[in-house]
């Protein structure tokens, strides 16, 4: 079990943010908590963190191509 | 991204303004149509792209798509219904102009919205800027700058004037006035000299201090405070839950209504009177699509609550979840623990009924010891105590300046065969005899904090019922009750009894805030509607059980926090109710007034969103 917090930039629409969080939580063994007000996302995963990160970024790019996620 | 939007808008305006001029001045269709189409393309291409992408993924009720439909719809109406102008008593390309304006205003609105969200985030982040970036640590006689995570307990860090204390610790050298405002919300600097405990996140305002680190970075105050505040947003308030439910049904309902408005009235009019009114009603339906986006609510309400958490932390009050605001704001009873909360939790001299010389000698003798009562006598004295012995916690027998001093409670003095008068005090009495002769007494008591008296007075003035819960005996409890002015007092309570007392109050219909310093208070903190742990993030059990943590011992913070919670709730309600009312009003106007222009609908919609975000800024300030 690994937990890591990321900074999410360019996700300014709350609607998209909600979608992003829901979609990311559908990944198996992954729990994501998005803090819209701070622009941060806490990812807890049973899988490899780098692999999870890639999968989450892919989801983010699909929902909001201009948004970026970086390690905090 | 925001710049892209701005460029789109500017390019669009370059075509749009001449377009309007040509339309009004000459009315040459081909000319203004070309300009409007170019203006529309400049403003709408990114929106169209997003909408297309979302549709390909099966998301239809997307604001990009709705805006696109509204503006394309206006164009199509203008082209299909050539007589549109006459029917609506407008200029030739009015609907087209509206279509372009929708896109321009939508982009401008989105631009400002992103700006507002960013500004709000920046504000919230700056409230939480107590995270130290680096630490200067002494290693092998040299100063090394490292990340605070890499400092071990027992190492010595150096903090210069103006620097943030990176880790919790004890001052080993130097002295400084510490600005604790980031942690406690108090602006008055606190003196820290050798031996003082200092907390990370505070700023040394002068001097240079060396600190022996007592806690690792993750366990230090600043880090734990930040973690608590950041986690707080995960607990959603009732209002936020309502909004996300509302948003889910709102958009589809308005879209369905738009379709109904576009079709039903026109069909009825067509069939009943044989009149063609399709363009009018379709146009009205487009206005509905424009207001169908629940953005104002979806963005502003979470921002309000999180901003509220940030604003509270600026006051030195940590609120552990957005769900706590409502109960905090509406609680009508404040139950307070006595020892350590209403009082300072340590003994101080209350009354001195003896002569100066005797008192001086007593001070000298008590200074030999370190139990709670002896610490009350931490005063300078010219007398010298040469030997002193503690007798089973009842008193002391000592020699001071060659005289025999006996001091203690009544049992002890009686046991020593000394005659004295009973002091009849509710407090702890120390009777003193010098060389076998009774010399009077001194009473010590746990001193009431001056801030407690003010706090209770202010809470009562605000309409709250105040109740003191204490494990102490009746006499002491009543004396403190009288001094602080609490409405009710319950004494002789065990920790479980305190929880039961709170439950009793709750059964009588009260919403109860319990304030305690956390020691042994976990059950009652958990029972109360709002458990308020005083004195910072000391014990884990207390923080776990509490809903609110007050970073210092100041009970007046309870009312400050309560007022802040009320403000947060009222701003959130203003945003919810205000946004819904304005949206409904726009819908009603669009349906009632046939000439209601599309651009006014979008201004209303984007405007209310920006106003709601701006309103949410209010919770960041005091």
Image (cartoon, coloured by chain):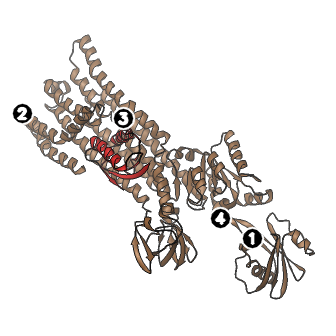
Dot 2 surroundings within 10 Å: few (below 14), some, or many (20 or more)?
A: few
Decide if residue B451 is on the left or right side of residue B474. left
The answer to whether dots 4 and 1 both sit on one chain is: yes
The residue singled out by tag 1 in the image is B373
- Closest to the camera, between mark 1 and mark 3, is 1
| Among numbered discs 2 and 1, the one appearing first in the sequence | 2
Residue at x-position 44% and y-position 42%: B574
The residue singled out by tag 4 in the image is B450
| Among numbered discs 4 and 1, the one appearing first in the sequence | 1
The answer to whether dots 2 and 3 both sit on one chain is: yes
Query: Does the CB distance between marks 2 and 3 fall below 8 Å?
Result: no
The answer to whether dots 1 and 3 both sit on one chain is: yes
Dot 3 surroundings within 10 Å: few (below 14), some, or many (20 or more)?
A: many
The residue singled out by tag 2 in the image is B30
Instruction: Inspect this view and state whether residue B402 appears.
Output: yes
Q: Position of residue B382 (x, y in %)?
A: 73, 87
Instruction: Inspect this view and state whether residue B120 appears.
Output: no
Dot 1 surroundings within 10 Å: few (below 14), some, or many (20 or more)?
A: some
Query: Does the CB distance between marks 2 and 4 fall below 8 Å?
Result: no
Q: Position of residue B258 (x, y in %)?
A: 30, 26
Give B38 or B603, whichever is nearer the viewer.
B38
- Closest to the camera, between mark 2 and mark 1, is 1
Q: Which quadrant of the view contains residue B395? A: bottom right
Residue at x-position 45% and y-position 40%: B240
């Amino acid at each position: 079990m690994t937990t890591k917090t990321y900074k999410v930039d360019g996700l300014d629409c709350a609607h998209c943010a909600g979608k992003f969080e829901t979609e990311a939580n559908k990944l198996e063994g992954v729990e994501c908590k998005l803090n819209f007000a701070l622009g941060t996302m806490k990812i807890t995963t049973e899988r490899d963190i780098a692999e999870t990160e890639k999968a989450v970024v892919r989801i983010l790019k699909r929902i909001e191509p201009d948004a970026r996620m970086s390690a905090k | 991204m925001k710049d892209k939007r701005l460029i789109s808008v500017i390019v669009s305006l370059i075509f749009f303004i001449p377009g309007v001029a040509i339309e009004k001045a000459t009315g040459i269709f081909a000319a203004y149509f070309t300009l409007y189409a170019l203006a529309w393309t400049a403003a709408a291409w990114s929106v169209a792209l997003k909408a297309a992408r979302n549709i390909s993924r099966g998301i239809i009720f997307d604001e990009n798509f709705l805006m696109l439909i509204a503006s394309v719809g206006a164009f199509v109406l203008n082209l299909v219904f050539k007589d549109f102008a006459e029917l609506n008593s407008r200029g030739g390309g009015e609907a087209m102009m509206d279509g372009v304006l929708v896109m321009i205003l939508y982009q401008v609105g989105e631009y400002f919205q992103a700006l507002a969200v960013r500004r709000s985030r920046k504000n919230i982040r700056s409230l939480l800027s107590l995270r130290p970036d680096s630490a200067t640590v002494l290693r092998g006689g040299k100063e090394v700058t490292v990340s605070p995570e890499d400092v071990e307990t027992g190492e010595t860090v150096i903090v210069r004037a103006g620097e943030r204390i990176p880790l919790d610790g004890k001052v080993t050298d130097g002295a400084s006035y510490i600005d604790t405002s980031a942690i406690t919300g108090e602006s008055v600097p606190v003196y820290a000299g050798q031996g003082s405990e200092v907390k990370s996140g505070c700023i040394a305002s002068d001097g240079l201090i060396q600190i022996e680190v007592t806690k690792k970075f993750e366990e230090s105050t600043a880090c734990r405070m930040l973690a608590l505040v950041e986690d707080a947003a995960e607990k959603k308030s009732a209002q936020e839950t309502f909004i996300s439910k509302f948003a889910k049904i709102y958009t589809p309902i308005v879209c369905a209504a738009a379709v109904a408005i576009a079709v039903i009235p026109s069909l009825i009019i067509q069939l009943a009177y044989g009149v063609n009114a399709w363009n009018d009603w379709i146009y009205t339906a487009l206005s509905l699509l424009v207001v169908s986006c629940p953005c104002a609510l979806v963005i502003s309400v979470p921002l309000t609550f999180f901003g509220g958490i940030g604003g509270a932390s600026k006051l030195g009050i940590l609120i552990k979840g957005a769900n706590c605001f409502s109960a905090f704001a509406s609680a009508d009873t404040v139950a307070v623990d006595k020892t350590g909360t209403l009082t300072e939790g340590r003994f101080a001299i209350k009354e001195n009924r003896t002569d100066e010389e005797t008192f001086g000698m007593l001070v000298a003798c008590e200074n030999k010891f370190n139990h709670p009562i002896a610490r009350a006598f931490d005063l300078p004295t010219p007398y010298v105590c040469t030997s002193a012995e503690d007798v089973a916690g009842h008193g002391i027998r000592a020699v001071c300046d060659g005289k025999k001093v006996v001091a203690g409670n009544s049992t002890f003095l009686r046991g020593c065969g000394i005659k004295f008068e009973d002091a009849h005090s509710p407090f702890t009495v120390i009777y003193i005899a010098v060389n076998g002769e009774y010399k009077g007494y001194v009473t010590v008591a746990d001193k009431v904090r001056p801030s407690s008296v003010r706090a209770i007075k202010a809470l009562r003035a605000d309409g709250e019922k105040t109740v003191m819960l204490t494990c102490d005996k009746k006499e002491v409890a009543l004396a403190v009750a009288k001094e602080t002015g609490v409405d009710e007092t319950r004494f002789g309570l065990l920790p479980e009894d305190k929880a039961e007392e709170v439950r009793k109050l709750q059964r009588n219909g009260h919403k109860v805030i319990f304030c305690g310093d956390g020691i042994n208070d976990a059950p009652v903190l958990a029972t109360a509607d709002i458990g308020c742990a005083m004195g910072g993030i000391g014990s884990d059990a207390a923080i776990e059980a509490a809903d609110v943590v007050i970073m210092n011992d100041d009970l007046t913070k309870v009312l400050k926090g309560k007022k802040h919670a009320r403000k947060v709730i009222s701003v959130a309600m203003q945003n919810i109710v205000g946004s819904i009312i304005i949206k409904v009003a726009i819908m009603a106007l669009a349906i009632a007034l046939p000439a209601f222009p599309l651009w006014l609908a979008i201004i209303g919609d984007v405007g209310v969103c920006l106003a709601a975000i701006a309103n949410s800024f209010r919770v960041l300030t005091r």
